[in-house]
Image (cartoon, helix red, strand yellow):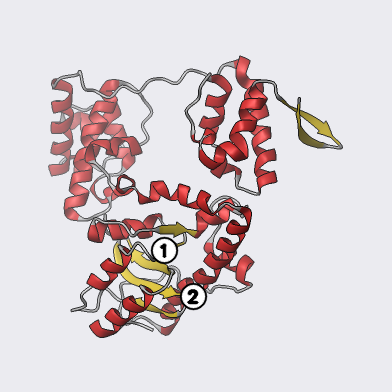
């Protein structure tokens, strides 16, 4: 069903507001814009049939949707919520609350790293989702019956996926673990892209302060241009070209034309002049605020054995707990535990401390050993 008028929208949102949770998904496009363009919003409740709201229908007042997203009594269930939440942040500068991500819940339940939605549906409901409409143009109207069915199926089965994951997690006493993992998704900072921070997303083959200072200024200019024109960053200038300009720091047109990743017509035009002006301003300006990235010391050989044992312990504990190892600790966590006296890492906090952190510290302090039994590595308390 596609919502056709204001009364239907009002009634639909009112019905969803009566339930304990709602399943939600979006269809959007972003290949030609900086901001995601919402093309369809699908929702369903435990006792409310799935329906889609078309933002391209003129005259619809979306206030009931906004109020529903802010309703603290209704849990909003997503799968791989990051991009969906970014859409709401762009539309309203407010995030839905409270939220629940079944992809994270599946990782806590031992389904592996970032399990695909269709695989999760197959495992938990024995249903097979059609993916024929996955890469269609959702902005074209009218939508076909196949597109509508595809879109609604996602929230129809998301209800059952959520309920089965919820049941497992309650039995395991792990439901709170999922809500702890929602903190990053609930933070507005996750969806903000300050221009002065944009350079950190561009790979460059140098950590010299002058290179990073030029890159920071160029990336900030590109970010502002992309936002104001609502086009992808690469439509302004590609990452590779930004990095090359920062590396070679051209001061005149002849030097700029030597950069192979920059087309000559762009170098000779307005963009080329802007690149030269920005580079010159940075190099001739004050240097005390140039970025300085502390060089990471080589990992000490003396701690290599400890690190390898921690990796093995992580595999053992993640298997015992039936939780994806990637969700428990990353390589930086393990390196910090291996080398620092009092490491401040996520692996030693919250539920991770229970699942892995305490054992990791005990292993490091000699209270746990690893031994081989019948071809399998096991941990032994000493």
Quadrant in the rendering for residue 260 = top left
18 relative position to 130: left or right: left
Residue, disc 1: 75
Dot 1, how many residues are within 10 Å of its Cα: few (below 14), some (14-19), or many (20+)? many
> Looking at this view, is 142 or 6 the one in front?
6
Which quadrant of the rendered structure holds the N terminus? bottom left
379 relative position to 241: left or right: right
Q: What element carries label 1?
A: strand
39 relative position to 354: left or right: left
Dot 2, how many residues are within 10 Å of its Cα: few (below 14), some (14-19), or many (20+)? many
The percent position of residue 243, horizontal first and vertical second, equals: 31, 34
At 47% from the left and 71% from the top, the residue drawn is 154
Residue, disc 2: 156
> Looking at this view, is 146 or 17 the one in front?
17
At 24% from the left and 27% from the top, the residue drawn is 213
At 58% from the left and 23% from the top, the residue drawn is 338
Q: Mark 2 or mark 1: which comes first in sequence?
A: 1
Residue 80 appearing in the image: no
């Amino acid at each position: 069903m596609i919502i056709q008028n204001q009364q239907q929208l009002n009634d639909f949102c009112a019905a969803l507001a009566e339930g304990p949770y709602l399943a939600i998904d979006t269809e959007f496009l972003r290949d030609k814009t900086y901001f995601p363009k919402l093309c369809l919003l699908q929702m369903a409740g435990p006792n409310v049939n799935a329906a889609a709201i078309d933002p391209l229908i003129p005259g619809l007042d979306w206030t009931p949707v906004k109020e529903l997203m802010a309703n603290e009594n209704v849990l909003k269930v997503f799968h791989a919520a990051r991009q969906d939440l970014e859409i709401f942040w762009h539309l309203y500068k407010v995030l839905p609350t409270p939220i629940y991500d079944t992809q994270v819940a599946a990782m806590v339940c031992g389904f592996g790293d970032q399990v695909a939605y269709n695989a999760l549906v197959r495992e938990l409901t024995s249903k097979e989702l059609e993916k024929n409409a996955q890469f269609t143009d959702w902005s074209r109207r009218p939508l076909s019956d196949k597109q509508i069915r595809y879109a609604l199926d996602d929230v129809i089965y998301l209800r059952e996926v959520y309920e089965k994951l919820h049941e497992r997690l309650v039995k395991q006493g792990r439901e709170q673990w999922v809500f702890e993992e929602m903190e990053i998704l609930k933070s507005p900072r996750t969806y903000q892209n300050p221009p002065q921070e944009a350079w950190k997303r561009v790979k460059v083959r140098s950590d010299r302060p002058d290179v990073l200072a030029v890159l920071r200024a160029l990336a900030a200019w590109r970010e502002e241009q992309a936002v104001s024109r609502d086009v992808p960053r690469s439509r302004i200038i590609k990452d590779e070209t930004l990095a090359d300009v920062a590396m070679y720091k051209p001061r005149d047109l002849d030097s700029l034309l030597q950069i192979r990743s920059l087309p000559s017509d762009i170098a000779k035009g307005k963009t080329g002049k802007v690149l030269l002006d920005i580079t010159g301003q940075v190099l001739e300006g004050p240097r005390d605020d140039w970025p300085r990235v502390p060089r990471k010391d080589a990992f000490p050989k003396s701690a290599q054995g400890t690190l390898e044992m921690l990796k093995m312990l992580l595999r053992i504990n993640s298997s015992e707990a039936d939780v994806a190892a990637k969700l428990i600790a990353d390589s930086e966590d393990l390196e910090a535990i291996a080398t620092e006296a009092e490491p401040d890492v996520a692996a030693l906090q919250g539920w991770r401390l229970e699942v892995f952190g305490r054992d990791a510290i005990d292993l490091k302090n000699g209270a746990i050993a690893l031994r081989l039994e019948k071809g399998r590595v096991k941990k032994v308390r000493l």
